[in-house]
Amino acid sequence: MVTRNECRALLEEWDKVTKKIRHKVELKETGPISNQKLAKYLAEELEEHSDVDTERVKNILTKAIIDLRRAERI
């Protein structure tokens, strides 16, 4: 499970780039997007906009995506 502090730190940047990320993913992918691939795109985009460790972000986002899909929120 992702910690509350990890989520808060990532969400500060999240709103700024969500639409751009979603558009890029839709252009690149024609089929279903795996949790890891979506996390990779999100981590790459966040790295461009802030000073964060991509691998750490990717791992946190993968966990968050899995949690959200289990809860049927995405």
Image: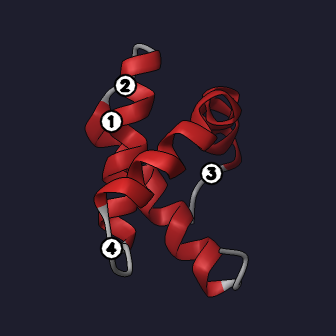
CB of mark 4 within 8 Å of CB of mark 3? no
Residue occupying the far top of the picture: 51
Spatial separation of the CA atoms under disc 4 and disc 2: 24 Å
**Residue type, label 3:** Thr
CB of mark 2 within 8 Å of CB of mark 1? yes
Spatial separation of the CA atoms under disc 3 and disc 1: 21 Å
| Horizontal arrangement in the rendering, residue 26 relative to residue 30 (left or right) | right
**Residue type, label 2:** Glu
Residue 30 marker: 4
The quarter holding residue 72 reads: bottom right
Identify which residue, 30 or 15, lies in the foreground: 30
> Badge 2 is on which residue?
47
CB of mark 4 within 8 Å of CB of mark 2? no
Residue 3 marker: 3
Sequence order check, earlier mark of 3 and 1: 3
Residue 44 marker: 1
Q: Mark 1, residues whose alpha carbon is within 10 Å: few (<14), some, or many (≥20)?
A: some
Q: Secondary structure at mark 4?
A: loop
Spatial separation of the CA atoms under disc 4 and disc 3: 32 Å
Instruction: Please tell me whether mark 4 or mark 3 is closer to you in this view.
Output: 4
Where does the N terminus fall, quadrant-wise?
A: bottom right
Q: Secondary structure at mark 2?
A: helix
Identify which residue, 2 or 69, lies in the foreground: 69
Sequence order check, earlier mark of 4 and 2: 4
Residue 52 marker: none
**Residue type, label 1:** Glu
How many marks overall?
4
CB of mark 4 within 8 Å of CB of mark 1? no
Sequence order check, earlier mark of 4 and 1: 4
Sequence order check, earlier mark of 4 and 3: 3
Q: Mark 3, residues whose alpha carbon is within 10 Å: few (<14), some, or many (≥20)?
A: few
Q: Secondary structure at mark 1?
A: helix
